[in-house]
Image: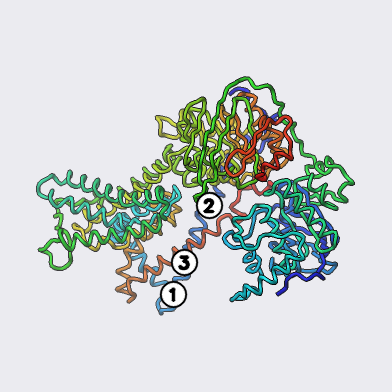
């Protein structure tokens, strides 16, 4: 259309021109985005203060606690590698929350997808051990784990789109069903009878385990998690798929009015989320446990929710936050032994952070400091 | 129980030097307004002029930074709406606040602050009947409110205030949901009651016709200040409008030319769509819109207009019926929007057509983000064409934004609408579906946006305009259809259309 300019007056120049403008533009953007760092940091600080009060109330020293977290999680090469190891499933389960969040869904079914994914990988491996080459077996296991996890969370997404079932509730309930399915097989048909202690599937054996990243003690799951964070960040921010997903998540009615395939988008995002958690399950089985059993349901899926919220569902922020929480988890044993505290203590800290963090959501937009100047000047 | 007693009188109300700031925005600046006892006062002003802020300060929703409020000459401090209620100040909101599933009688009784835990309905019924006896109008007490007509609901809202012995009534655009006939009836009755001294009324309004016909005096707010006022009739409508707009320049509306194309472009045949409760809100709707024609759909809100627009734009499933464009089946999918060049300006663009936390540039790219040059290889987004296009549209359509990267929620209503308009109208438009495009906008934006719509018509687009503003329909349309009960009740050429006849069909007669 060539005859469009119906507006007679020229546009009022509110955009400053030139290099100076670009700089102030940049400063304003930094100012605005610093809010997303300052408020979560503030929330963690408040939660830590509350936790310190809790420790004082039970007669323990908060300073000791911090010292032990440092020693047990970050202080030495050994403990830091242990932390990285533990952060691997957290990165993946956090992605399982962050991806659906971008399309407007609060999915908390990572735990279920992790458990089922890990179990599916182990179950697939049983007939292949000693028959198929380890590399092929591991690849097939990983793919299968992702498919099963993707199906499990994808189901919640489908129910949300097609039937209007609340995805938070359905993904949580599917988690319990997933754990029950694993227990059913592990304690029944697939139980390794040679192991009398704990109902488990048959062990994979050392030849069929995922190795360590060369030069470290950290398994490949950590690298896979970081790689997926970058990949999914690009998917969300730089592709038409991600754009459509963000439109759908930001305003469902607008997405419909643009004729976007919202059902496909919702189910795909959910399935990607489940696949991430399923992959976490694969690494827990193939790099840590060596078999599927009840230890898979160790709560990584739930801690991942916390990591994703603290990272504000930004895949690139997930790894550092996951490492922080991996460290806290890793130091749990040391704290238990040295401070004579039950291991649920760490959960108290996590719970406090989560509650304070959710409360801090109400603070966004309340501080004039973070608002761009241009907007403040306009009345 | 503090129910109506015949001795109560409408009080006078006066604000002195009332000021309120939100951050850097001076929403109210030293506003002094006097409403004498037993008068009908009109509060005029554009959107954002501070009318709501003033009223909310009076009602105790906000605490003014400065200034006093006096009722019957007595200075009072209203800290919350309950205190306003206790002082006899009540408000009728733009949208109904009744409980739809309860009957009128139940609504009245439960609205009382002192409603007992166990209600003796026989006694209450008697009291209610006695109360209605003394009222100038009545409503059926035993039907659920959801089954009442809009006019009856509005009457019930007013009765509720009187029942609670509120004698200073603040009405916020009370007639926007009514037919012209219903509006005249209710305002006439309120005016009589005021002149008998039983109540005092302050009405926020946009409609000069109503102000001239029913109000005694008026005050005009602009940018938070009182800029004029006086006796109604002492100044002309034109002068009132000038006070409201100030020095803003209102572009003249685009001239319509004889349309170049011919033939039916958009045809809707036997369309059915359900509302959220599962009833057929669109109930066998038929219309034909020719190329180069604007067909206006008038109607009282809640007669299926919203559902019609939603069904056409893909926000609501079509239950039955056909939509044809150029005699070919149209379905509201992305492919068809592009293929048939169907565009839309939905009502409340922040809610229906944009993603508030995405940037202006991204919002402007909704139609084209998945096509070259914005998408490379069909999936990789390329940000420079998105930014470049946004800069061009921002300049061409006069969108006031600090930068293309500003989240669109930070823009004013008029600029959000202009941004959406730029996105939807910058391409080649064959069919345009418009719903209440000027709702809540200032005069300059309204003229601008109406001009753009007419221009699309002149270019040969088929335009379906759904609006609750009859004046807008009369100004823009070539033909006018009245929608009532989910279907077309009446259709006429705009030239020589009769407001009264249209009003009668709007009311469903």
Q: Mark 1 points at which residue?
A: A54
Q: Is residue B1 above or below residue A104?
A: below
Gap between marks 2 and 1, in whole Å? 30 Å
Q: Can residue A15 be seen in this view?
A: no
Chain of the residue displaying label 2:
A
Q: Badge 2, how many Cα within 10 Å: few under 14, some, many 20+?
A: few
Gap between marks 2 and 3, in whole Å? 20 Å
Marking on residue A47: 3
Pointers 3 and 1 in contact (C-beta within 8 Å)? no
Residue at mark 2 shares a chain with residue at mark 1: yes
Residue A102 lies, in percent from the top left, at 44, 48
- Image quadrant for the N terminus of chain B? bottom right
Counting residues from the N terminus, which is met first, the one under dot 2 or under dot 3? 2
Chain of the residue displaying label 3:
A
Position of B458 compared to A100: left or right?
Answer: right
Numbered disc in front, either 2 or 3: 3
Mark 2 element type: helix
Q: Is residue A10 above or below residue B162?
A: above
Marking on residue A34: 2
Which quadrant holds residue A94? bottom left
Residue at mark 2 shares a chain with residue at mark 3: yes
């Amino acid at each position: 259309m060539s005859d469009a300019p119906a507006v007679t007056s020229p546009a009022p120049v509110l955009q400053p021109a030139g290099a100076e403008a670009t700089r102030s533009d940049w400063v304003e953007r930094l100012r605005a985005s610093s809010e997303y760092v300052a408020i979560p940091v503030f929330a963690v600080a408040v939660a830590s203060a509350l936790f310190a009060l809790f420790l004082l109330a039970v007669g323990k020293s908060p300073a000791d606690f911090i010292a032990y977290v440092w020693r047990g999680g970050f202080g030495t090469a050994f403990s830091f590698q242990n932390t990285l190891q533990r952060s691997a499933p957290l990165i993946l389960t956090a992605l399982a929350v962050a991806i659906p969040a971008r399309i407007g869904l609060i999915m908390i079914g990572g735990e279920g997808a992790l458990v089922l994914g890990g179990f599916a990988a182990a179950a697939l491996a049983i007939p292949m051990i000693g028959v198929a080459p380890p590399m092929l077996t591991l690849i097939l296991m990983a793919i299968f784990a992702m498919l099963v996890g993707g199906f499990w969370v994808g189901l919640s997404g489908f129910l949300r789109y097609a039937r209007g079932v609340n995805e938070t509730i359905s993904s949580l309930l599917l988690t319990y069903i997933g754990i029950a399915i694993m227990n059913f097989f592990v304690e029944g048909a697939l139980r390794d009878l040679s192991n009398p202690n704990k109902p488990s599937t048959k062990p994979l054996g050392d030849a069929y385990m995922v190795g360590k990243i060369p030069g470290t003690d950290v398994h490949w799951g950590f690298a896979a998690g970081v790689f997926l964070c970058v990949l999914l960040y690009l998917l969300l921010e730089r592709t038409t798929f991600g754009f459509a997903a963000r439109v759908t998540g930001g305003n469902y009615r607008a997405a419909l009015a643009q004729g976007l395939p919202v059902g496909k988008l919702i189910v795909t995002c959910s399935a990607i989320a489940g696949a991430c958690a399923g992959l976490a399950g694969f690494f827990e089985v193939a790099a840590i446990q060596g078999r599927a059993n009840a230890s898979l349901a160790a709560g990584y899926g739930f801690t991942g929710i916390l990591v994703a919220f603290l990272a504000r569902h930004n895949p690139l922020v997930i790894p550092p936050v996951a490492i922080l929480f991996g460290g806290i988890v890793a130091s749990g044993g040391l704290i238990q032994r040295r401070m004579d505290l039950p291991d649920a203590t760490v959960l108290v800290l996590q719970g406090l952070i989560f509650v304070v963090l959710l409360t801090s959501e109400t603070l966004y937009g309340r501080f004039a400091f973070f608002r761009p100047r241009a907007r403040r000047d306009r009345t | 129980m503090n129910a109506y007693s015949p001795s109560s009188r409408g009080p006078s109300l006066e604000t002195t030097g009332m000021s309120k700031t939100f951050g850097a925005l001076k929403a109210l600046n030293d506003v002094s307004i006097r409403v004498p006892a037993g008068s009908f006062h009109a509060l005029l002003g554009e959107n954002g002029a501070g009318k709501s802020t003033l009223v909310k300060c009076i009602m105790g929703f906000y605490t003014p930074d400065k200034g006093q409020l006096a009722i019957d000459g007595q200075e009072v401090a209203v800290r919350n709406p309950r205190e306003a209620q206790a002082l006899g100040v009540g408000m009728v909101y733009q949208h109904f606040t009744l409980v739809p599933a309860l009957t009128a009688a139940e609504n009245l009784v439960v609205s009382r602050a002192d409603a007992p835990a166990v209600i003796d309905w026989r006694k209450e019924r008697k009291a209610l009947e006695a109360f209605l006896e003394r009222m100038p109008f009545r409503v059926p007490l035993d039907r659920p409110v959801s089954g009442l007509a809009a006019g009856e609901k509005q009457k019930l809202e007013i009765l509720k205030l009187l029942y609670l012995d509120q004698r200073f009534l603040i009405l916020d655009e009370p007639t926007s949901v009514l037919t012209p006939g219903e509006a005249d009836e209710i305002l006439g009755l309120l005016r009589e009651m005021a002149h008998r001294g039983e109540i005092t009324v302050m009405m926020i309004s946009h409609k000069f016709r109503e102000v001239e016909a029913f109000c005694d005096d008026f005050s005009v707010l602009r940018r938070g200040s009182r800029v004029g006022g006086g006796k109604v009739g002492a100044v002309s409508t034109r002068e009132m409008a000038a006070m409201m707009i100030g020095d803003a320049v209102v572009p003249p509306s685009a001239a319509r030319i004889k349309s170049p194309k011919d033939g039916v472009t958009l045809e809707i045949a036997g369309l059915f769509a359900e509302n959220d409760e599962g009833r057929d809100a669109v109930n066998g709707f038929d219309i034909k819109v020719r190329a180069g024609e604007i067909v206006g759909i008038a109607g009282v809100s809640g007669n299926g207009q919203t559902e019609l627009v939603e069904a056409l734009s893909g926000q609501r499933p079509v239950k039955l019926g056909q939509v044809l464009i150029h005699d070919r089946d149209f379905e509201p999918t992305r492919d068809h929007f592009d293929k048939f060049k169907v565009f839309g300006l939905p009502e409340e663009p922040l809610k229906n057509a944009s993603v508030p936390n995405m940037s202006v540039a991204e919002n402007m790219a909704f139609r084209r983000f998945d096509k070259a040059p914005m998408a490379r290889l069909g999936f990789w987004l390329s940000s420079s064409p998105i930014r470049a296009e946004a800069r061009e549209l921002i300049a061409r359509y006069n969108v006031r934004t600090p930068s293309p990267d500003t989240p669109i929620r930070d823009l004013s209503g008029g600029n959000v609408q202009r941004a959406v308009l730029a996105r939807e109208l910058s391409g080649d438009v064959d069919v345009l579906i418009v719903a209440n495009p000027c709702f809540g906008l200032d005069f300059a934006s309204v003229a601008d946006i109406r001009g753009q719509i007419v221009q699309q018509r002149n270019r040969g687009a088929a335009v379906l305009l759904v609006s609750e503003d009859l004046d807008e329909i009369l100004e823009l349309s070539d033909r006018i259809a009245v929608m009532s009960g989910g279907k077309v009740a009446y259709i006429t050429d705009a030239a020589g259309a009769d407001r009264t006849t249209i009003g009668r069909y709007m009311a469903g007669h």
